[in-house]
Image (cartoon, helix red, strand yellow):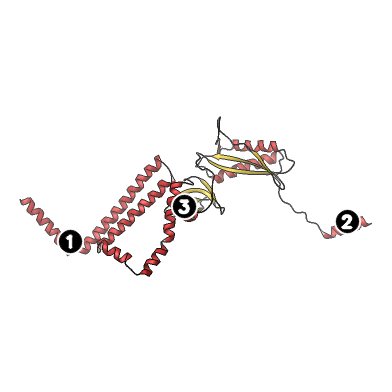
Amino acid sequence: MVFIENLQDFFEDLGDFINDNKTLVSVLLILGILILIWLLRRLNAIVFKRIQRKQPGLHVLFFERVISACIFIVGIIVIFSVFGGVDSVWKSMLGGTAIISAVLAFAAQDVIKDILAGMMISVYKPFEVGNRIELEDGTAGIIKDITMRHVVIQGIDTQMWVIPNSRLNSMKIRNFSYHAVHKGAQFQFNIAYGSDVEKAMSLIRQAVIDSEYTIPGKLTDKGREYSHVYFTAFDDSSLRLVTTVYFEPKTPSEVVISDINMRVDNAFREHGIEIPFQYINVINKSDVSEAEEKVSK
């Protein structure tokens, strides 16, 4: 009985303290909620990080960001409720004039479009983290990250492209490693008419094989092999040779492209394979006049 009476006295004193120090209690409660928000978001990040290790994918990154944002929004609503209840918060947020509601709806259009587009990208997966893609406007790079609003594409060196999900979802995308274990890049080499085509094709293939960055990536009946070099077209002033080069996802595309181009250029120079280029003949009028006079004489 004594314990129960002491417990009753404790709760009465606690109630009196809360009534006398409402501001302090509210502040402490808000701090507690903020700490809880931080802990839940950290736990969410840890859980999805483990999922990412077992099942990597763009959708895992996207939904980790969505859940983290939901935790933050719910936490803010709870904090506002401390100052007057959830009902009053919703009335103050949504019970304004029609003009305010229209402005908020208009401002949220782009955000909603980006979130929905991000969800579509995550579900249908036109690309994954680590894929090299090229957009219809010429932007090219490696997919590094996706958030609720945008996708991050890494270009050359530290150059980053941050593109809204809604814009990316509506563009044509060229994926160089779609559903592939390895990354791939297509190379095009032009040689002059009259060149030894078979020799040029052999030099290109050997340059690809000799590169320290390339790997056999073309799947055949015999296993994975280096891609063949193909003679694809007679251009206006050159013969077009193309091949596909495969390499590990962690290797930057620009490093591979530079290495292969250097090797092919050196091999063509060494074996006398001409790479055609445009040139201009400049004719001096005085020289033409003198030549015409000599002919007339």
- Packing grade of label 3 (10 A; few <14, some 14-19, many >=20) is many
- Packing grade of label 2 (10 A; few <14, some 14-19, many >=20) is few
Q: Position of residue 77 (x, y in %)?
A: 30, 59
- The circle drawn on residue 151 is 3
Label 3 secondary element: strand
Do we see residue 141 in this rendering?
A: yes
**In front of the other: label 3 or label 1?**
3
Q: Nearer the viewer, residue 234 or 6?
A: 234
Amino acid identity at mark 1? Ile
Can you say whether 228 is above or below 88 in the image?
A: above
Q: Position of residue 255 (x, y in %)?
A: 56, 44
- Packing grade of label 1 (10 A; few <14, some 14-19, many >=20) is some
- The circle drawn on residue 18 is 1
Q: Quadrant of residue 231?
A: top right
Amino acid identity at mark 2? Ala
Q: Quadrant of residue 85?
A: bottom left
Q: CA distance from mark 3 to mark 1?
A: 48 Å
Q: CA distance from mark 3 to mark 2?
A: 65 Å
Amino acid identity at mark 3? Val
Label 2 secondary element: helix
What residue is drawn where x is 45% and y is 47%?
Answer: 124
Q: Position of residue 288 (x, y in %)?
A: 85, 58
Q: Position of residue 282 (x, y in %)?
A: 78, 56
Q: Is residue 89 left or right of residue 276?
A: left
Q: Quadrant of residue 240?
A: top right
Q: Hey, which residue is sitting farthest right in the picture? A: 297
Of pointers 3 and 1, the one earlier in the residue sequence = 1
Q: Is residue 286 left or right of residue 181?
A: right
Of pointers 2 and 1, the one earlier in the residue sequence = 1
Of pointers 3 and 2, the one earlier in the residue sequence = 3
Q: Nearer the viewer, residue 131 or 89?
A: 89
Q: Identify the residue position indicated by label 2 in the image.
A: 291
